[in-house]
Structure formats: C-alpha cells, structure tokens
Image (cartoon, rainbow, N blue to C red):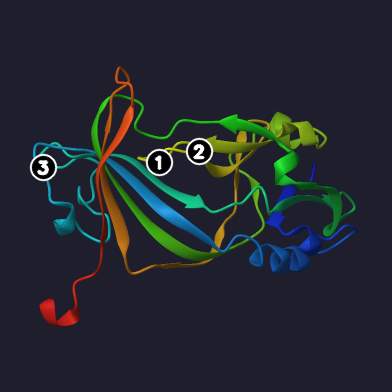
Amino acid sequence: MTPPLIFVVAPATLLPEANTSLEDLQVAQALGPSSGFSLRIFNRGADHPDLGGLPVDGHLTGELRRSSDGTEMLCDALILRIEPQHHWLGVYQGEPEEPTSLQCLDRVALSELSNATCWFYPTHDGTFLSWERDLRLSLQPGSIADCPEELASAPYERSRLSVLWSLLGDDASLTCVGLTYGGQRLDWPLRVISTEPMATWGRFRVDSQADHTLVVEDCLTVFPAPPWAA
C-alpha cells in the first residue's frame, strides 16, 4: 500500500529538506498559518434586520439551515489565512519499508503554483447577509480529503497542485481559500482554535445586470453583551 502524502504549509526555512519524522512536521506546521475566519452567508428572509441587533455568534437559523421567516444559511465555512506570497508547501511521504521515516518529495513557494478559482455563495442575484468572525488557530500536517484510490496510488506530481481563490460574501477581491491536489481539497486538521470576541455583519446586494454587480449596503462590527446586561 502506498503511504499517504503529507502536506505542510509554513515559511520555507521551517520545512525539512531531507528525511524527517511526523513529530518534526507537526512542529513546522504549528509555526505556519495561525489565523483564519468563520464565514456564514444568509439569504435574507422576510425581515429587514438592524445589523446591530444580530447575534455575535452568527446563529440566525437555530440548528437548521432555514428559519420560519425564510432566512436560509447558504454557506458555513472556516477559511484559513494562507498567504501565497509568504508561505511555502512541503510534501512528504513515508518510506514503504519504514513508514515512520518521511522523505521530502517537494518544497515549493505557493506563489509558484498554478491558480484555480471556485464559487462561494452567493451565485445568484438578491440581497444577502454575511457574518465573519476571526479565529486564532494551530494546525496539524495536512492530507488529501476524500482521496480516491487512483490518486492515492499515483506518484506525486507538482503539476497536480493548485492554489484555490474565490470571492467571499461581499468582498470585492479574491481570497485564497485553500489548496487542492489532483482536484481534491487539502485538509489541515485543527490542533487548537479560539474565537475573537467580536464579529462583523454585512448586508450586500448582487445584481448581475447592473454596472456594479456587487453593492455593500451596510457593515457593522458587533460585540458580546456585557455580563451585567444579561
């Protein structure tokens, strides 16, 4: 059985160039990306809420994706802040006869990889609400999510790697939302995660027929209620 590929995103100087161990890769990955954000996008229901009255935890629909007033959660994502201009990718694989000894297959600047785009919601016209909350985090080394057998057994090729970009919510510019290998998403399990106390709500409109297809109507940072207000 072919040992799985292991991926580490970190500054170039932290990526081992020779044979290494999983413990060394865990140390390197822990010094890689350390922040991200939660993103939710909602199709606005019948109400026209005041952004200042919306919850800091981003819960508008309870445990369901749609609430009784027609508000629907279209997107619920955790985005790592991977910076292609600063981060490198190291690719490692266990030796068939000694799986605990990991060989370095590749080290490459993310800025040198091919780019691909993907769609986040919304993908249709309308007025939407977006919620973002910053995260502090630490990652484990990554792997190929839902890796098909033919990809798992194939030799490593750098040309299969892509940096994935998308427009998120009411953003006007592209954001790096991750990496893929052979068209499959790379996944970095979370070691530690904590949330910032505040969050940002926005209301924006998408009109594919207008001169300006994206218009941000309102944006507001909200904070938890003080303990004495509970």
Label 3 or label 1, whichever comes before in sequence order: 3
Q: Is residue 144 above or below residue 80?
A: above
Q: Which of 32 and 64 is in front in this view?
A: 32
Is residue 94 found left or right of 186 in the rendered image? right
Query: Which image quadrant for residue 228?
Result: bottom left
Amino acid carrying label 2: it is Leu
* Residue 96 coordinates in the image, percent (x, y): 87, 49
* Amino acid of disc 3: His
In the image, residue 83 above or below residue 16 = above
What is the secondary structure assignment of the residue under circle 2?
A: loop
Q: Mark 3 points at which residue?
A: 48
**Residue 201, above or below 162:** below
Residue 185 placement: quadrant:
top right
Instruction: Report the front residue among 131 and 140.
Output: 131
The residue lying at 68 percent from left, 54 percent from top is: 86
State the mark number for residue 30.
none
Q: How far apart are marks 3 and 1 (CA)?
A: 21 Å
Residue type at tag 1: Asp
Q: Residue at x 75, y 47 (%)?
A: 109
Badge 2: residue crowd in 10 Å (few <14, some 14–19, many ≥20):
few
Residue to which mark 2 is pinned = 174
Q: Which residue carries the number 1 mark?
A: 171
- Tell me: 35 left or right of 28: left
- The answer to whether the residue labelled 2 contacts the one labelled 1, judged by CB atoms less than 8 Å apart, is yes
Comes first in the chain, label 2 or label 3? 3
Secondary structure under the numbered disc 1 in the rendered image: loop
